[in-house]
Amino acid sequence: MSFEFTVLSDDRFIEILEAWVDSPWPKTAEDGYALRDRFGWTQKEGKPNVFTSDVHPIGFPCGDLSAFL
């Protein structure tokens, strides 16, 4: 079994953190989807709350926005 660990660059981490903190609260699902799209993350077909980010290899779900909404 192999395992690959990927880390965001400092600049990318700060970009995501600032966008998340500076966006309206409380967040709606639409706010979460807009952030997902802004970051270039890819949604799973038919499931907009499940997405792949630039940290995970393509095709592996990274997160579920409903956990934050």
Image (spheres, grey):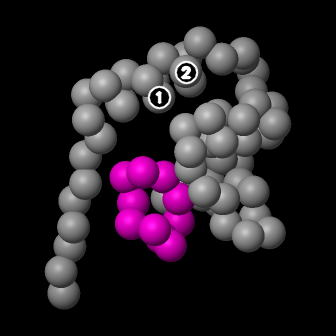
Question: Can residue 67 be seen in this snapshot?
Answer: no
- Picture residue at 70% right of the left edge, 48% below the top: 66
Give residue 52's position: percent from left, percent from top: 53, 59
Give residue 34's position: percent from left, percent from top: 72, 35
Give residue 10's position: percent from left, percent from top: 26, 28
Circle 2 packing at 10 Å, graded few (<14), some (14-19), many (20+), is some
Q: Which numbered marker is on residue 19?
A: 2
- Picture residue at 73% right of the left edge, 70% below the top: 45
Q: Is residue 25 above or below residue 10?
A: above
Image quadrant containing the C terminus: top right
Residues under labels 1 and 2: Cα distance? 5 Å
Q: Which numbered marker is on residue 28?
A: none
SS for tag 2? helix
- Picture residue at 37% right of the left edge, 52% below the top: 55
| Residue 63 located left or right of residue 69 | left
Image quadrant containing the N terminus: bottom left
| Residue 55 located left or right of residue 26 | left
Q: Is residue 57 above or below residue 39?
A: below
Please name the predominant secondary structure of the magenta segment in the image: loop
Give amino acid for label 1: Ile
Magenta stretch holds residue 60: yes
Q: Which residues are magenta?
A: 52-61
SS for tag 1? helix
Residue linked to disc 1: 16
